[in-house]
Amino acid sequence: MNFSYFSRELTSSTLVFEIVMWVLLIWVLWYGISHYRFFLWRFFALAFWVFCFEWLTGALWNNAHLGKYAYIHNDISWILMFTWTILIFLGKFVYDKKIHNKTLLKEFLFVVFWSSILVAIVILLLKDIGVFSYSSATLPLITSSILIYWRPLEAILYIPVFIFTVYSFYKYWELTMYDKNLFSNYTISAKKDIFISIVAISLIWYLMHPLLETSLLASFLLIIFYVLGLVITNFMVNSIKGIPLFQRYISGMFIFSVLVMFVTSVMIEKGMIILAQSVRDTYTINTISIPWFAFTDVEFVGIILFSCLMIAMVKYFKIITDDKNIRLDDKNMTFQGFISIIKG
């Protein structure tokens, strides 16, 4: 791997940025612990998925000048991981403080909107001080003549999609700590399942497609196969009764991962999918041996993370759209709900 395209040397501007982030981190943790039950668990749950998502999309952008101790892997930084987590929770804090007629759907839309604005402002700042830049895979796609605050439209749209995906994954697991009965009724609605699956797959594909070199036809076929795989997975898992949520989730992840691996492996073998050069420059690519599949380790881990996200996103939106008036009181959060997803 060649990482000469970015420097880890700390600059005075990034030092100021990191100090501000440390102050914000301490304040968010203090405020969260003071106002929310099990906030440390919730904070690090969201931070963990932000890290997973940054690893998954790491070849889309470069992060420089954060100091040699600020990086977890390649140019993925724990400083930025906590930054995005902090900004998402700031959106949630404002919602809980200002909105009185609360529902899960309203909270989700509010947090995605306002956190996206905060993240966009910080990214603009990071670009100006030389920390954030787009990779060779992303630059050709950032060509829109439509500008928002002097930035191309495509670059701005990536931000709410990013918040949308990581926050929905987090919210799915946060719900398990309230009431296991939220997950006891498994409705199967073909139209809703297909619609939610199409939206979820399309959003992730919008973020991920620069990492793959595919034709328009191959991209269309891939989305169709993934949607079918997600609908089949949901139908199979929702048909299973009497097992804890965690086991159901793992079952769904396994089924969907196998389906995605099969489809992707066939398309790779036929030359319909090729990893972008930026991916090869960012990760160490090793071929792994799995019977009937031809994969690299990067593709394998990427598919597992992709499957984890898809199952959680679809289930979360099924829950909040089945009952749009769900209201949860933070005082009712208990680890008994969390334990019940494992023990039943």
Image (cartoon, rainbow, N blue to C red):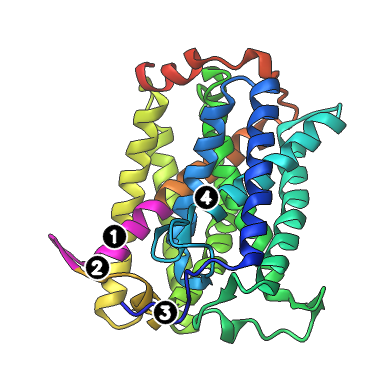
Amino acid, disc 3 = Ser
How far apart in space, not on screen, are marks 2 and 1 (Cα)? Answer: 6 Å
Can residue 192 be spotted in the picture?
Answer: no
How far apart in space, not on screen, are marks 4 and 1 (Cα)? Answer: 19 Å
- Who is closer to the viewer here, 105 or 197? 105
Residue under numbered circle 4: 50
Residue under numbered circle 3: 278
How far apart in space, not on screen, are marks 3 and 4 (Cα)? Answer: 21 Å
Q: Give the numbered dot on residue 296.
A: 2
Q: Quadrant of residue 162?
A: bottom right
Residue under numbered circle 1: 300
How far apart in space, not on screen, are marks 3 and 2 (Cα)? Answer: 15 Å
Is 145 situated left or right of 254 in this image?
right
Q: Residues within 10 Å of mark 4 (few under 14, many from 20)?
A: many
Is 155 situated left or right of 215 in this image?
right
Q: Earlier in the sequence, mark 3 or mark 1?
A: 3
Q: Are marks 4 and 1 in contact (CB under 8 Å)?
A: no
How far apart in space, not on screen, are marks 2 and 4 (Cα)? Answer: 23 Å
Magenta-tinted stretch: 287-306
- Who is closer to the viewer here, 113 or 55? 55
